[in-house]
Amino acid sequence: MSAQAEAEKEADDRTTVATVCLGGCSGCHMEFLNVDHGLIDLVEEVDIVASHMIVDEKGVPEADVGIAEGVVTNEENVEVAEELRENCDTVVAWGDCAALRGIMSLRNYQDRDEMLEETFAEKADDESEVPFGDDEGVPKLLEDARPLDEYIDVDVYVPGCPPDAEVMKESLEALARGETPEIEGDKLQYD
């Protein structure tokens, strides 16, 4: 952690949290917002420094805890995952896509190029073309969708599709106390 980040941390002893959404539906972030008024209590313990639905921050800043939702499905996802691991002390795979590869990996059973051709060219207008990566401003699709831990080291898994909002809140509170969250039994949720 940089000297400036250390000084800011001393002034504010809350655990800093950065979240990212990789390839997925944002359902985990949406469920997390169901904590509702519990967010007010939670921000006494954690400072959410980056989250696409809560904080307007581009990139992944240095943080105590980095949370990734979604499966790694394109080259940009790989870069974001690597940035998360580099800038965060503890990395959390939030939800089944990040932890296990989830429903988004159903595309792994189709030929990638055929799928792109059918989606972008055959079902669009006569002038539509398949985007081929950075040339079109669209990240290149990886051959397969894979879970987060196939690209970076993951410290904590919070499974579920999506995990229950209260379980996500309790997990963050445990991490803020320096504990590893325990998620088992009725805390596992698949809606």
Image (cartoon, rainbow, N blue to C red):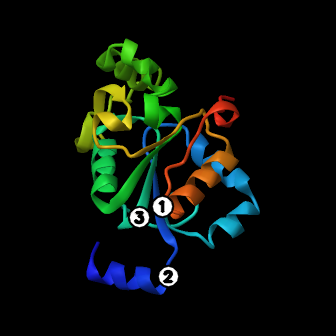
Q: In the image, what residue occupies the spot 29% across and 43% down?
A: 152
Q: Which residue is mark 2?
A: 12
Mark 1, other Cα within 10 Å: few <14 / some 14–19 / many ≥20: few
Question: Amino acid under label 2?
Answer: Asp
Q: Residue at x 31, y 61 (%)?
A: 87
Which badge, 2 or 1, comes first in the chain's sequence? Answer: 2
Residue lying at 44% horizontally and 38% vertically, measured from the top left: 23
> Mark 3, residues whose alpha carbon is within 10 Å: few (<14), some, or many (≥20)?
many
Q: Do callouts 2 and 1 mark residues in contact (Cβ within 8 Å)?
A: no
Determine the image quadrant of residue 62. bottom left
Q: For this view, does 166 lie left or right of residue 104? A: right
Q: Residues within 10 Å of mark 2 (few under 14, many from 20)?
A: few
Q: Going by the image, does 31 lie left or right of 25?
A: right
Tell me the kind of residue under disc 1: Gly
Quadrant (top left/top right/bottom left/bottom right) for the C terminus = top right
> Residue 35's x, y, as percent?
71, 54
How many discs appear?
3
Classify 166 as above or below 100.
Answer: below
Local SS, label 2: loop
Judged left or right of residue 99, residue 42 is: right
Q: Residue at x 36, y 23 (%)?
A: 116
Tell me residue 178's x, y (percent).
Answer: 48, 61
In this view of the protein, which residue sits in the foreground, 119 or 171?
171
Per the image, the residue denoted by label 1 is 178
Give the residue pinned by disc 3.
Answer: 64
